[in-house]
Amino acid sequence: MTPAEVSAARAVDPQDFDIERVRADFPILQQEVNGRPLVYLDNAATTQKPASVIEALERYYYLDNANVHRGVHELSERATIAFEAAREKVRGFLHADDAREIVFVRGTTEAINLVAQSYGRANINHGDEILVTEMEHHSNIVPWQMLCEQTGAVLKVVPINERGEMIAKQFEKLLTERTKILAMTHVSNALGTINPVKSMIHRAHDVGAVVLVDGAQAVAHIQVDVRDLDCDFYAFSGHKLYGPTGIGVLYAKQNILDAMPPYQGGGEMIEHVTFEKTTYNILPYKFEAGTPNIAGAIGLGASIDYLRTMGLGAISAHERSVLRYAMQRAQEIEGLRVIGTAELKCSILSFVVDGTHPADFGTILDQLGIAIRTGHHCAMPVMQHFALPGTARASIGMYNTREEIDEFINGIVRAKSMLI
Ligand code: C6P
């Protein structure tokens, strides 16, 4: 977050956020699990969906289902209009210049693989360096390792400190003329750390590198403006933004996308095919081979509409106040250690308790109707850094309340008394 964004978000009073109204919009939250009201604190894994998103999916399948960009009939026309309207909503949401810069993919993972295999294979050579941080999700490590194996490039890693922040001095040292790609997460899924992506992008451009930002954990909590960030690529998943699974977005600058070879071949991505030669479709369709997840895109458009009515500023102010409360309450528990105490963080409370295994907390809390995630969170290098087998992780979404945090804290105390 830039300082301006921080102060804009802080200007929103969390008291203004009508949490009861928000909760009423999410049908799944109205249930009991194991005889207790559900407390859903696994939003970093996937968020729940408001009724308006579920209804958009339903409406599409009830009334408009057809393939896009293919038929001349009424249903195909309607499906195409709704699909492209969703793309335009994503463009607006990211503040991108042009809808041609918005490629629909399955999720963050596919977006990063697309960049590694298309941009990477075409532009990365033996001895080039790809720079990531130690806090990356496996999705922002493994595709680059694969690219390094294919090209002879070298993966470099910016270490983190004990608070779980990237060490700026090390970043400056590792970023050199040899760096061709900088790929870093906007927000860490294991620690909650918010990276200073804007300044990192600026520095990377100074040495001629292109920059990919993994926005999987950022888009639901931070207002993203790709033009202001000046990132070359930005990736996120719909299901972490209160939208459906199986749909995600790769934003890429138009000139870069234009010069990239296709990622997959098939229908939709072509202009003309003969056995001798194929020419490719215009952007963004060159990168959307095969029938896309039409309903998913429409559902994602509906989730963006929903977020707009709530206002991301108000949502993040509310979440920040709930996270602050959770961090304070967690400190009351003897032997509990928060993993990830960065100055700038959002949504995530990862912890371990001396003398216990994190997985046990997940199981006991589940018996109390409280959903959290335990384990390495697909960020094994983070666990290696802290010499831990894993953590227990609560991740906060827009519908979580302080009362739920109280339930969660009581649950940890109870679990601890059973385990020690
Ligand atoms: N993290 C979590 O519980 P996909 O699976 O493609 O939608 O997102 C992958 C991904 C990439 N980057 C970051 C920072 C992420 O957090 C994730 C997904 C989930 O933390 C599932 S492992």
Image (cartoon, helix red, strand yellow):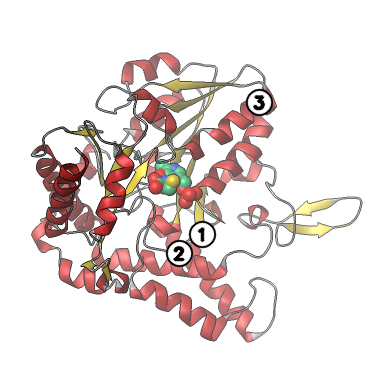
Earlier in the chain: of badge 3 and badge 1, it is 3
Q: Amino acid at mark 2?
A: Pro
Q: Quadrant of residue 240?
A: bottom left
Q: Mark 1 and ligand 1: say if the CB distance to the nearest ligand atom is below 8 Å.
A: no
The answer to whether the residue labelled 1 contacts the one labelled 2, judged by CB atoms less than 8 Å apart, is yes
Q: On screen, 117 above or below 300?
A: above
Find out if the beta carbon at label 2 lies less than 8 Å from the nearest ligand 1 atom: no
Which residue extends farthest top?
A: 173
* Residue 246 point in image, percent of width and height: 52, 59
Residue 82: x %, y % from top left? 51, 74
| Residue at mark 3 | 149
Quadrant for the C terminus, please: top left
Q: Which mark is residue 244?
A: 2
Judging from the image, what secondary structure is the residue with disc 2 in?
loop
Query: Can the viewer see residue 222 in this picture?
Result: no
Please state which of residues 355 and 21 is positioned toward the viewer in this rendering.
Answer: 355
Inspect the image, locate mark 1, and give the three-letter code of the amino acid beneath it: Ile
**Which residue is under mark 1?**
247
